[in-house]
Amino acid sequence: MLQYCKSHISSIKKLYPHLVEEYLEETREIYAKLIEVEAGQATERKMYKKVCKTIVEFNKIFGSQYAQNIISDFKQKYVKKPAFIDELGKLK
């Protein structure tokens, strides 16, 4: 199942409950990769909100420390996307 998620990263949203206990680090890495892919493809506010929703889900699963790292990385990486920065700023 872990291998499947590595090659089909969007499946991690549904399969993480079966993986997180035994493969915590790997599951977190795949989920973070999914967030990066979603952010890279996002081009409008609606998509940015979807990325932020995924970050909120990630936060609930893995903790705020990891989520805050992603948020701060994105604020630096996507400085030229003010709508995305605005949506990221709404996350606590």
Image (spheres, helix red, strand yellow):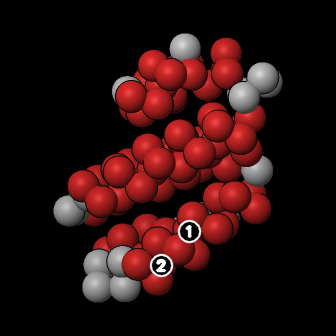
Q: Is residue 90 left or right of residue 38?
A: right
Q: Residue at x 29, y 78 (%)?
A: 81
Q: Which residue is mark 1?
A: 71
Determine crowd level at label 2: few under 14, some 14-19, many 20+ residues with C-alpha closer than 10 A.
Answer: some
Q: Secondary structure at mark 1?
A: helix
Residue 60 image offset from top left, x and y in percent? 70, 42
For the point 30% across and 60% down, the residue is 40
- Look at the picture and state if 5 lies above or below 18: below
- Closer-to-camera residue (33/7): 7
Q: Residue at x 54, y 49 (%)?
A: 32
* Residue 36 visible to an observer of this rendering: yes
Question: Do callouts 2 and 1 mark residues in contact (Cβ within 8 Å)?
Answer: yes
Q: Identify which amino acid the numbered label 2 is placed on.
A: Lys
Q: Is residue 21 left or right of residue 9?
A: right
| Residue 55 horizontal/vertical position (percent) | 54, 51
Q: Quadrant of residue 8?
A: top left
Element marked by disc 2:
helix
Q: Quadrant of the C terminus?
A: bottom right
Taking 65 as reference, is 3 above or below it?
Answer: above
Residue at 47% from the left image edge and 72% from the top image edge? 74
The picture places residue 89, in percent across and down from the top left corner, at: 53, 74
Please tell me the numbered disc located at residue 23.
none
Tell me the tag on residue 75.
Answer: 2
x, y (%) of residue 21? 79, 24
Residue 46 appears in view:
no
Q: Check disc 1 and give the amino acid type.
A: Ile
